[in-house]
Image: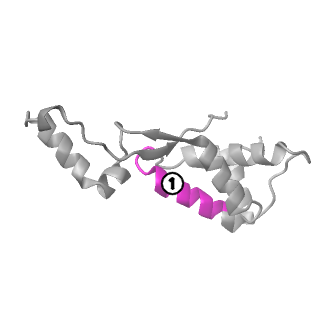
């Protein structure tokens, strides 16, 4: 069993035992990226990407091996912006998007071709590790 299996990651977090990595410049961030990816994809990331990020960050901060700056850097590298496929979390924060889409679907006139700028949602795309 690998140290990157989800069960092992959760156990190490609970026990606050360190994740092993080689002592080189790229090994620590790579280890953290794999851990974050495994934790992130095990949660409700499609429905609540920001809440999932906060939960994963808090788990790792409670564990204590990685700093907030290291964790944030991994999330920043994995961030992507979307404008059409909003999560439930984002729609709850922006109910005007639901109303605008509903009125457009009902055939309401669209402000004579004037395109309204929609807010962008930040979601995260990590590699999937087996």
Specify the farthest residue to the right: 23
Residue 34, image quadrant: top right
Image position of 85 (left or right of 21): left
Q: Residue at x 87, y 45 (%)?
A: 25
Residue 87 shown in magenta = no
The magenta stretch is 46-60
> Percent x, y for residue 124?
53, 43
Looking at the figure, which quarter contains the N terminus? top right
Task: Classify mark 1: helix, strand or loop.
Answer: helix
Please give the count of numbered marks on the rendered protein.
1
> Percent x, y for residue 63?
71, 64
Q: Nearer the viewer, residue 76 or 2?
A: 76
Image position of 66 (left or right of 95): right
Q: Residue at x 85, y 47 (%)?
A: 21
Q: For the residue carrying disc 1, how many other residues have a C-alpha within 10 Å: few (<14), some (14-19), or many (20+)?
A: some
Q: Tell me if residue 110 can be seen.
A: no
Image position of 53 (left or right of 127): left
Looking at the figure, which quarter contains the C terminus? top right
Q: Which residue is mark 1?
A: 52
Q: Main secondary structure of the magenta part?
A: helix
Describe the colour scheme in one phrase. one colour
User: Image height check: is 47 above or below 126?
Assistant: below
> Percent x, y for residue 5?
70, 43
Residue 54 shown in magenta = yes
> Percent x, y for residue 73?
67, 51
Q: Nearer the viewer, residue 2 or 114?
A: 114
User: Image height check: is 54 above or below 80?
Assistant: below
Q: Residue at x 66, y 35 (%)?
A: 129
Q: Residue at x 12, y 33 (%)?
A: 112
Q: Tell me if residue 72 can be seen.
A: yes
């Amino acid at each position: 069993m690998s140290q990157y299996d989800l069960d092992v990651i959760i156990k190490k977090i609970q026990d606050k035992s360190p994740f092993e990595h080689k002592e080189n410049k790229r090994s620590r961030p790579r280890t953290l990226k794999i851990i974050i990816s495994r934790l992130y994809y095990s949660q409700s990331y499609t429905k609540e990407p920001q809440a999932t990020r906060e939960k994963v960050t808090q788990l790792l901060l409670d564990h204590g091996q990685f700093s907030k700056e290291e964790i944030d850097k991994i999330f920043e590298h994995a961030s992507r912006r979307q404008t059409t496929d909003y999560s439930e979390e984002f729609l709850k924060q922006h109910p005007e998007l639901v109303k605008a889409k509903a009125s457009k679907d009902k055939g309401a006139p669209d402000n004579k071709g004037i395109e309204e700028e929609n807010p962008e949602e930040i979601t995260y795309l990590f590699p999937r590790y087996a």
